[in-house]
Image (cartoon, rainbow, N blue to C red):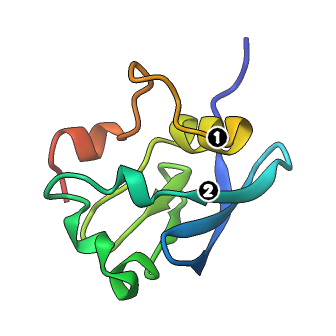
Amino acid sequence: MTSLPRVTAARHVRDHVLWLEFADGTAGEVDLADSLEGPMFEPLRDLEGFGKVRVDPDLHTVVWPNGADFAPEYLRERLRRGEEPSPSQPYLTTRSRNGIT
């Protein structure tokens, strides 16, 4: 059984690009500009807001003060493939999908 990816470090690099590191040692940049759709992500289009990213120790992924987050599986796939994952790939954590802030 494979374990779920866990984001262990994140920093804002430029524009809507984050540098991420995962528990397995994989690290690199992910451009999320094309993923910032909908009311939860609208505030993150502003670079000042986007730059307030942090790693949530319970969700093991990146989060922002407004409650927006991305599933670590989505981020890992974006990093691994260097492209948008298939449309069936979920990219919100349960918290974002349910609108919990």
Res 88 → quadrant:
top left
Q: Dot 2 corresponds to which residue?
A: 30
Residue at far top of view: 1
Seen at 56% across and 67% down, the residue is 17
Give the vertical position of 96 relative to 29 (above or below). Answer: above
Label 1 SS: helix
- Name the image quarter holding the C terminus: bottom left
Mark 1 burial class by Cα count in 10 Å: few <14, some 14-19, many 20+: many
Q: Dot 1 corresponds to which residue?
A: 76
Q: Residue 100 placed where, x, y %?
A: 17, 51
Q: Residue 32 placed where, x, y %?
A: 47, 57
Residue at far bottom of view: 48
Give the vertical position of 87 relative to 7 (above or below). Answer: above
- Residue type indicated by callout 2: Val
Give the vertical position of 87 relative to 15 (above or below). Answer: above
Horizontal side of residue 8 vs 73, given as left or right: right
- Between disc 2 and disc 1, the foreground one is 2
Seen at 64% across and 40% down, the residue is 76
Q: Residue 92 placed where, x, y %?
A: 35, 40
Mark 2 burial class by Cα count in 10 Å: few <14, some 14-19, many 20+: many
